[in-house]
Image (spheres, grey):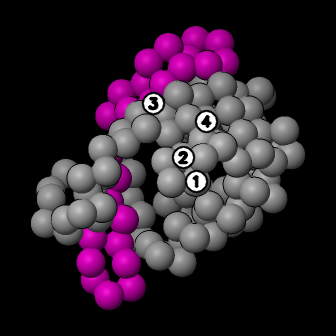
């Protein structure tokens, strides 16, 4: 399934924390909606989110829990992630991204997650 392949490759790029690798999945037409950031349009705006995330959490691991739909070009991906800061702290998040892809590019992604992880570094995944 192309949708799932694109999203799994995207997660690998995000885990690498490499902006060049992440940028391959976005275009100037892409939109990314993230809590606390709102809707970001085009790689220029989207890049600011990733720069902030990488600066604050230089380590990331992601487990894809489920993929819903996606037969053609849209669906949702349920995930569990662990962010690590440079001081050894960890933040665990669980969420779902609703995504539309166009070829190998993320056209639109809306991120939903349980923000409890941001308030405790003792939560386990």
Q: Residue at x 62, y 61 (%)?
A: 49
Q: Is residue 107 magenta?
A: no
Q: Nearer the viewer, mark 3 or mark 4?
A: 4
Residue 34's mark? 2
Q: CA distance from mark 1 to mark 3?
A: 20 Å
Q: Main secondary structure of the magenta part?
A: strand
Q: Which numbered circle lies on residue 37?
A: 1
Which quarter of the figure has residue 65?
top left
For the record, the magenta segment spans 64-90
Asked if residue 9 shows in the view, the reply is no
Q: Residue at x 19, y 51 (%)?
A: 125
Residue 77, numbered circle? 3
- The spot of residue 27 in percent (x, y) is 82, 45
Q: Nearer the viewer, mark 1 or mark 3?
A: 1
CB atoms at circles 1 and 2 under 8 Å apart?
yes
Which comes sooner in the sequence, label 3 or label 2?
2
Measured as percent of width and height from the top left, residue 106 is found at: 70, 36
Q: Is residue 91 above or below residue 13?
A: below
């Amino acid at each position: 399934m192309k949708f799932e392949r694109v999203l799994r490759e995207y997660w690998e790029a995000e885990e690498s924390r490499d902006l060049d690798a992440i940028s391959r999945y976005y275009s100037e037409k892409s939109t990314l909606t993230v809590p606390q950031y709102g809707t970001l349009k085009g790689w220029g705006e989207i890049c600011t989110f990733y720069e902030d995330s990488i600066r604050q959490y230089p380590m990331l691991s992601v487990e894809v829990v489920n993929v819903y739909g996606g037969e053609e070009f849209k669906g949702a991906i349920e995930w569990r992630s662990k962010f690590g800061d440079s001081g050894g702290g960890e933040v665990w998040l669980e969420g779902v991204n609703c995504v539309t892809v166009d070829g190998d590019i993320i056209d639109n992604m809306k991120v939903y997650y349980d923000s409890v992880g941001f308030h405790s570094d003792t939560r386990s995944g």
